[in-house]
Amino acid sequence: MDWSLLITQLLNGLQLGLLLFLLASGLTLIFGIMDFINLSHGSFYMIGAYFCGSVVAKSGSFLAGIIFGLAGMFAIGALVEWFIARKLYRADHLDHVLVTFGLILVFDTLVHLIWGAAGMAIPLPDALNGQITLGSLVFPVYRLLIIFSGLIVAAILFILVTRTRLGMLIRAGASNRTMVEALGININRLFLIVFALGAAMAGLAGMLIAPITEASIGMGNDIIIVAFVVVIVGGIGSVKGAFYAALILGLIDTMSRSYLDALLKLAMPVTYAETAAPALSAMLIYILMAAVLAFRPQGLFPPAGMK
Amino acid sequence: MSWLPQSVSGRIYASLLLILAPAPFFFEWINQPFYLDLLSRALILAIAAISLNLILGFGGMVSLGHAAYIGIGAYCVGIPSYYDYYNGWLHLGLALSVSASFALLTGAISLRTKGVYFIMITMAFSQMVFFILLSLEEYGADDGLVIYSRSEFPAWLSMDSSTSLYYWIFGLLLLSLFFIHRLVNARFGRVIVGSKFNEQRMQALGFNTYRYRLVCYVISAMICALAGMLLGNFAGFISPDMISWARSGELIFMVIIGGVGSFFGPLVGTIAFVLLEEFLSLITVYWHLIFGLMLIALVLFGKGGIHGWLSLLDRRGGGHG
């Protein structure tokens, strides 16, 4: 067995998991607290990448790109909440799906209008462009940075949710929204903050991945579905659940892509294994989600007090 | 003449069908085959939208994975054709049986869930189909597969010319409209609609609502697979993209534009959707922006879709709905 490959794949899985967590944590809060299905959450991921790219192109500083990008995404999230989402909280889920599907079209086209149809590459500072070599293990510095910043954001979010007043309200909102309102909390402001915060985190995920994949139109439309899988598997409204589920799914997805065909070859003829492995590894997370929905619909780690 | 539709909206729908019936000859006469293609595609998608409306509009089951059945129907034409089996009855039988089995299996699991979970689980199953087809290198994977010849039927049923294919589409459209109308107005449909509004009451009346819903889901999937079988023949090309979740989202939109839970709503909704798409994309490359804004405005302000607006005419005209 090739141990350095295994470790590299584990780190890749961790990286994917943390990016998924950045997307899913906002999604699960918006879903859990406002009971709002936001298909266009993936658009925030895309817009974040373009924002950051533009600032980097102007200023030459990646850090400035991230900071301005976060602020911009917070503002966009607040605008979407203010003008659109807020009007729909009392409508049924079908309306959420429809409106946010329309929003995806609008955002994709706006990006096309502003930045053009071609993708946008984001150059990395030289310091981040290198590789770290440990024995036979070679891993790009930038990917380690993604993992590192993902963990830091997760820690900050965890402290925010469990140790601050805002976090207490968020948790209370996820468990019982009516009760929070009855206690005299300005629920509209809470919703606005949660939505904008979610947009900023989705944007951050886009900014972090863009130097590797480059920013492109529709880049959020596939990953958002995986983020929904994370939310469902983790339990709607649970940040902790989103964290575990994102890591589990990130690892399952990465590991099955690299090892499933070897595993299947033990059980069936090589040609079948080579056809079945990619299909099965792409399906695995959806199979997991279907199983969770069928047998434990509240998710693996539902928020406390939620029935 | 009591068999004539009494309401204004009913008369409009009846006239629409009368206009659609001779369409191929009209387009041939004005020498615009392109419009026949456009209309054929719209009517195929209308069959799919009508099938989705059965579970979504009448049954309250919001599926974000219905395009999977279009894909299943289309691949049931494409894969046999790849091995030179062009027999149309084979294609038809495969499309119906494969879609029914898949719907029975996934529906049995999905229908254990409700509301938003149902949306997500149907989406998950269609993603599974998507990735299976994506991995089938033999059948073109994501490049898709070209179908060189249409399904073969006896001469009087042939779908080889675009006119005869149109009448296949139009015929199946009428059949599905008629079938769903009978179904919904039968006891079966009453139970389905009843359990959308108050499931507990239906159960208290002694109906096994789960079973009724499952049968309804399977029927809807089979009708949708018919649309897929027609789409494979019409386009002569199949690819996993037919099943992506965005396609399923568009299907929901076609139903909503027309009006949820009305018999003709999905038909007019789909025609409006396809025409709008075609028309807007001629004006500007940025047509998705206008389209997206229209969809948002429709949900925020335009309750009831086209059928809802037409029904306003009924009330004004004093007809009996």
Image: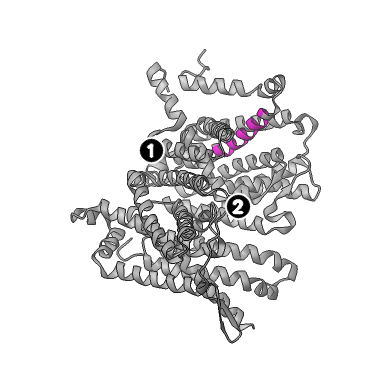
Membership of B45 in magenta stretch? yes
Residue A209 horizontal side relative to residue B298, left or right: right
> Which segment did they paint magenta?
B35-49
Query: What is the chain letter for disc 2?
Result: B
Q: Position of residue A111 (x, y in %)?
A: 50, 48
* Residue placed furthest toward the left: A184
Residue A47 position within the rendered picture, expressed as x and y whole percent measured from the top left: 46, 54
The residue where tag 2 is placed is: B102
Please give the residue where the numbered disc 1 appears in the rendered image.
B300
Crowdedness near tag 2: few (<14), some (14–19) or many (≥20) residues, C-alpha within 10 Å: some
Residue at far top of view = B1
Instruction: Give the spatial CA distance, label 2 vs label 1.
Output: 35 Å
Q: Residues within 10 Å of mark 1 (few under 14, many from 20)?
A: some
Q: Amino acid at mark 2?
A: Phe
Query: On the picture, is A226 further left or further right than A173?
Result: right
Q: Report the residue at 66% width, 40% height from top.
A: B231
Colour pattern of the rendering: one colour
Please determine if labels 2 and 1 lie on a single subunit.
yes
Q: Position of residue A303 (x, y in %)?
A: 34, 65
Split into 4 quadrants, where in the image is the N terminus of chain A?
bottom right
Residue at image point 60% right, 21% down: B19
Taking depth in this image into account, of A128 and A195 the one nearest to the observer is: A128
**Quadrant housing residue A163:** bottom left
